[in-house]
Amino acid sequence: MTEPLVFASRSEADTEAIAQLVANTLTPGLTIALNGELGAGKTRFVRALCRALGGREDQVSSPTFVLMQLYPDARIPIAHFDTWRLGSADEFQLIGAEEFLHSSDWLCLVEWAERFEFLLPEDRLECRILHVSETEREFQILGIGPKSSEIIGHLSKTSGQL
Ligand SMILES: Nc1ncnc2c1ncn2[C@@H]1O[C@H](COP(=O)(O)OP(=O)(O)OP(=O)(O)O)[C@@H](O)[C@H]1O
Ligand SMILES: [Mg+2]
């Protein structure tokens, strides 16, 4: 597990810039576990990542009621999950989530990941979003496992660009 990289966001524009930087380091087959309280900005960050990857970010909404949304048009196809309303691990399996989580083609973005951590790949990025004030957030991003640690290595080299 790497040390977390910390990014301060003072506005949604900052969050877009952070997402752009993160997106530049991402490769297919990765999972990002997104954690943070209600309204922290998990969905907002997904939208920014989707835009950065050339997907149709206008389609990104909270998938709270559908559990899963796919953005196959992005440069790396994105599967977006929200486990908030997930009643059990079986439900996650029923919607076919595992196929995406263990695929080498898709980027998986999982809101409220900590609720069903055991369903996620062991090698994953963790992104915790802290609510600092109405307009400020803190992003803490770390890697668990070799593939994700390498991504964090690339990200730390470019983080000075912000
Ligand atoms: N610096 C910032 N970065 C990101 N979002 C911000 C920022 N400042 C304000 N916001 C606002 O915070 C809100 C974040 O909402 P969002 O739906 O992304 O949260 P969430 O973590 O997905 O919540 P939920 O747990 O309900 O799914 C949005 O209304 C967004 O406009
Ligand atoms: Mg959300």
Image (cartoon, grey):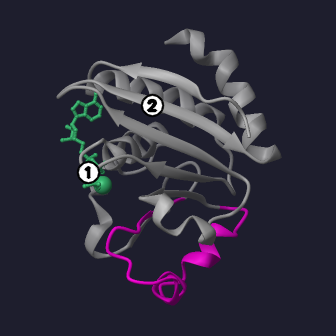
Task: Give the answer, above or below, for where 83 lies relative to 113.
Answer: below
Q: Marks 2 and 1: in contact by CB < 8 Å?
A: no
Q: Position of residue 82 (x, y in %)?
A: 39, 65
In magenta segment, residue 86:
yes
- The earlier-in-sequence mark between 1 and 2 is 1
- Residue lying furthest left in this view? 134
Between 104 and 138, the one nearer to me in the picture: 138
Residue with the mark numbered 1: 38
Residue positioned 82% across, 45% down in the render: 146
Say if 64 sits above or below 24 in the image. below
Front residue of 62 and 104:
62
Q: Amino acid at mark 1?
A: Leu
Q: Which class describes the residues within 10 Å of circle 1: few (<14), some (14-19), or many (20+)? A: few
Indicate the quadrant containing the N terminus: top left, top right, bottom left or bottom right: top right
Give the residue type that dot 2 points to: Phe
Left or right of 67 on screen, residue 29: right
The magenta region covers 78-105
- Residue 54: numbered disc: none
Is residue 71 shown to the viewer in this render?
no
Residue 100 part of the magenta-drawn span: yes
Question: Percent position (x, y) of residue 80?
Answer: 45, 61
Q: Residue at x 47, y 50 (%)?
A: 34
Q: Which residue has dot 2 on it?
A: 139
Image x and y of residue 63, in percent: 31, 66
Inter-mark Cα distance, 1 to 2: 15 Å
Disc 1 under 8 Å from ligand 1? The reply is yes
Task: Give whichever of 1, 53 is nearer the camera.
Answer: 1
Q: Residue at x 62, y 61 (%)?
A: 106
Q: Residue at x 63, y 77 (%)?
A: 99
At mark 2, the secondary structure is strand
